[in-house]
């Protein structure tokens, strides 16, 4: 399988770890690479499992865009990885894999990665008026608006996010600290006969 993958000109790097094949490629070749992997009988990676991203805030190529494909015929999974800049637009693969529709919308909504020629690129998980992209490393924890339904006013209200001090000082060291250690049914051991 690896030898056949080396024949694809658009691949930069190939690595195999624990029956997983990891390919690095240039983003300008995304449609070509995925089409070859799906249509060529040597590969048959015809199932798209996921599209996601990883944010590296300090790098010039801020995002690693990751495609995960599976070949049921060959019982193999492949991870396709490419790096893109913050404002780069990526060609949509919805023409090759219909399931890419939701995954690309999710990447757009949570990371702000735009896909060219996507049939319906709009928010999918956050509200339409939501500001920012929540999975970016520079997304602020406070300062944006939150949406909630107010029972008294019987409508949806937009208001600034406010975290009270008690939520800011959360101690995550031990959830059991301060609890009395009692073993129920062990009362007889404390009784002296």
Image: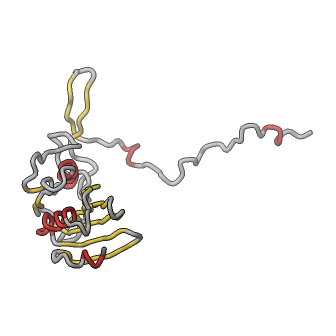
Residue 86 sits in quarter: bottom left
Position of the C terminus, as image quadrant, is top right
Position of the N terminus, as image quadrant, is bottom left
Front in this rendered view, residue 145 or 57: 57
Front in this rendered view, residue 181 or 68: 68
Q: Is residue 75 above or below residue 13?
A: above
Which residue is found at the position 20% from the left and 66% from the top? 40
Furthest residue in direction front, as rendered: 41
Front in this rendered view, residue 162 or 24: 24
Which residue is found at the position 11% from the left and 69% from the top? 28
The image's colouring method is secondary structure
* Residue 171 horizontal side relative to residue 122, left or right: right
Furthest residue in direction left, as rendered: 117
Q: How many marks?
A: 0
Which residue is found at the position 15% from the left and 53% from the top? 94
* Residue 122 horizontal side relative to residue 149, left or right: left
Image spot of residue 29 (x, y percent): 13, 69
Image spot of residue 188 (x, y percent): 83, 38
Q: Is residue 3 above or below residue 75?
A: below
* Residue 180 horizontal side relative to residue 86, left or right: right
Image spot of residue 80 (x, y percent): 25, 67
Image spot of residue 5 (x, y percent): 25, 75
Residue 15 sits in quarter: bottom left
Q: Is residue 97 above or below residue 152?
A: below
């Amino acid at each position: 399988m690896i030898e056949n993958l080396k024949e694809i000109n658009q691949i930069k790097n190939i690595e195999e770890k624990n029956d997983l094949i990891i390919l690095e490629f240039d983003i300008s070749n995304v449609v070509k690479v995925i089409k070859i992997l799906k249509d060529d009988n040597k590969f048959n990676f015809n199932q798209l499992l996921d599209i996601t991203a990883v944010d590296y805030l300090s790098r010039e190529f801020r995002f690693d865009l990751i495609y995960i494909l599976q070949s049921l015929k060959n019982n193999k999974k492949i991870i396709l990885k490419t790096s893109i800049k913050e404002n780069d637009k990526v060609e949509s693969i919805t023409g090759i894999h219909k399931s890419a529709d939701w995954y690309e919308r999710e990447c757009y909504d949570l990371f702000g990665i735009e896909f060219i020629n996507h049939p319906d690129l709009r928010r999918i998980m956050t509200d339409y008026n939501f500001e920012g992209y929540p999975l970016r490393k520079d997304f602020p924890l406070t300062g944006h608006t939150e949406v909630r339904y107010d029972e008294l006013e019987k409508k949806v209200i937009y208001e600034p996010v406010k975290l009270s001090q008690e939520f800011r000082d959360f101690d995550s060291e031990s959830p059991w600290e301060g609890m009395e250690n009692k073993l129920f049914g062990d009362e007889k051991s404390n009784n002296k006969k």
